[in-house]
Image (cartoon, rainbow, N blue to C red):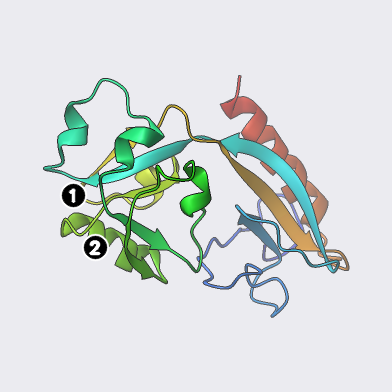
Amino acid sequence: MEGGEPGDPVRLKRVDDPAGGLTTGQSDVAIMRTHTGRRSLHEELLVMEPRVVAVPSHCPLIDLDEVLLRDLADYPLVINSFSGTTNLDLWEEGGQPVVAVEVDTIDDWQSYIAAGVGIGVTPASTAWMHPHAEISYLPLRDAPAVPVYLVWASNNRHPALSSFIELARDVVAEGTE
């Protein structure tokens, strides 16, 4: 958020930081998919986002009518351990896939998947936020949804903060109707 008047610009940026840049001053407000666990930050649940499975374009999973977690057990998994929302806890003990590689960025995550090293599980928004010509995103029917939070510093006094929060709530409400 730049100013505090209607029509003032909002700058969107990706910040590779567990606190979304809120504690370093890089951001006024962040959209996050994990709890920050910091008392200095206020979190508001906006929506629960479904998960999808990201597969290389030649993967046999593409031919399934419905993809379930158990269908993924025989495929190596690529995990973004820095900013991702997936870990082996999604699967029941004994039905977990093997982790092929752990990465720190969405770009590396996509590169390994596109190269056929493994598959990935991610929130559905990844498909439109980070499209990739060599990756198909398939709905994952039985995976728990991912919480999406709007987060800001508890001491944030930005003049446009309350307007931005209301706008975020309205946008999410329109998308779920």
CB within 8 Å, label 1 to label 2: no
Mark 1 and mark 2 lie on one chain; the one further toward the N terminus is: 2
Whether residue 126 is situated above or below residue 48 in the rendered picture: below
Q: Which of 32 and 112 is in front in this view?
A: 112
| Residue at x-position 86% and y-position 64% | 154
Q: Mark 2 packing: few (<14 Cα in 10 Å), some, or many (20+)?
A: many
Quarter of the figure that contains the N terminus: bottom right
Query: In this rendering, would 176 be left or right of 22?
Result: left
Is label 1 or label 2 in front?
A: 2
Residue 161 is drawn in which quadrant? bottom right
Rendered-image quadrant of the C terminus: top right
Classify residue 57 by image quadrant. top left
Residue at image x 11%, y 42%? Answer: 58
Could you tell me if residue 139 is visible in this image? no
Disc 2: which residue:
112
Query: Mark on residue 133?
Result: 1
Secondary structure under the numbered disc 2 in the rendered image:
helix
Judged from the image, the secondary structure of the residue bearing numbered disc 1 is loop
Mark 1 residue type: Ala
Q: Position of residue 44 (x, y in %)?
A: 77, 47
